[in-house]
Amino acid sequence: MSTKTDILYTRKYRDNAVNLLKPEAFPLFTATAFTANSLAEIKEAYRQGYTYIRTNNPDRDVLASQVTALEAPGMDRDTLIFCSGMAAISTTIGTLLKPGDHVIANRAIYGETFDVFGKMYKKFGIETDLVDMDDIENIKKAMKPNTKMIYAEVCANPTMNLIDIPAVAEVAHKNGAYLMMDNTFTTAVSIKPLTLGADIVISSMTKFMNGHSDAILGCMTSTHEVIEEVRPMRMLFGTPADPFPCWQMIRGLETLYLRVETQMRNAAQLAAFFEADPHVIKVNHPSLDSFKQRDVAKKLWKNDEAMSGMMSIILNTEDEDKINAFMLKLKYVHYATTLGGLRTTLNHPCTSSHSHMPDADRRAMGITPGMFRVSVGIEDINDLIEDFKNAFTALD
Ligand SMILES: Cc1ncc(COP(=O)(O)O)c(C=O)c1O
């Protein structure tokens, strides 16, 4: 045999000493296909094994099983993993809805999710109404006989508006509509929307679920019926996740509780500090008595320190020079165009997510140039408070 051939076929390792599927850390399977030696083996692989990477992959399966365990304990549910949060959203909606269907979405919603409804699927004849879901009567009024889906984030970006999940689920189900929820800002550590009546839950795993700011993925958990409808469409949309970020997130999820419980506790303590500091005129975090939907927060959560690692604050100035000086004075906390990582980061909605909107529209949503979104990390809370206290002196 020539070396040219040998290099392609030689794979020596102690195969009888290694159970490939039982190492302490689950291996990364980057193979785009699995091989077979006979038609019988191929048929078996198609029936219940691994064939081609876009169809199935062991890392994707392991990650999906972890997410199902998190989002739907004790429930007969399943999960699909997608190459991004947006892929989870657009593939699921593109599968479940058809021309002539109507959607009600919360007005406070991630901009690109709104574009999935307002730009992408509108041209296929799916109409979406945006309503202010702080008042459930607005949803009831917007319901139509063809309403097939109510869509909302558990905690909206950046204003933290909440959804009364059991009450909205009741309205959806009376009409035979799905309640689809985005759990990105909260995660299943904080709240499990499926156990409260939602039908479909998605997350951008890119954020808290991975936690290390180094991979992009999305997940969707629902009934077997929904999953088996979406699974073949995920193959056609070409939106299954690559194995490498799945492997990263298998590891990320193993520390999910450690990270997110700390982030949520830090966030509640930081929110209390902000509320008492004169440099901050408003704090949006559900743990505070001043939070506009505190009654809904109390209904959804028992523990003020286990709600969300996210919040937004409004500084006592809109002066850009002062805001720049404040940002430059921060030692640890820094600006980043993501959230949910180990380090505390800021985001300025008026220059990023909401920069395309007229100022008056933004102000009507409670978003002003003095607003920062804060994603709280796992630092020592005293260091975080000191960092902000020191940087706030730049606003004086
Ligand atoms: C609430 C929310 N949903 C969905 C997404 C989209 O996720 P991805 O960036 O993983 O596609 C984001 C992204 O920031 C988000 O904040």
Image: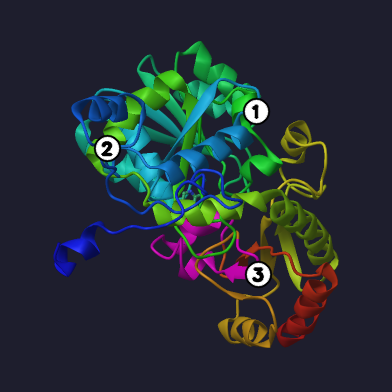
In the image, is residue 363 above or below residue 55?
below
Residue 158 figure quarter: bottom right
Q: Quadrant of the C terminus?
A: bottom right
Q: Is residue 315 magenta?
A: no
Mark 1 closeness class: few <14, some 14–19, many ≥20 residues within 10 Å:
few
Q: Nearer the viewer, residue 364 or 216?
A: 216
Q: Earlier in the sequence, mark 2 or mark 1?
A: 1
Residue pointed to by mark 1: 73
Indicate the amino acid at tag 2.
Met
Indicate the amino acid at tag 3.
Arg
Residue pointed to by mark 3: 343
Q: Earlier in the sequence, mark 1 or mark 3?
A: 1
Residue pointed to by mark 2: 235
* Residue 365 seen in the figure: no
Residue 191: image location, x then y, percent: 67, 37
Q: Nearer the viewer, residue 1 or 280?
A: 1
Give the residues drawn in magenta, as a range. Answer: 341-367
In space, the residues marked 2 and 1 are separated at their CA atoms by 27 Å
Residue 210: image location, x then y, percent: 56, 55
Residue 5 figure quarter: bottom left
Mark 1 residue element: loop
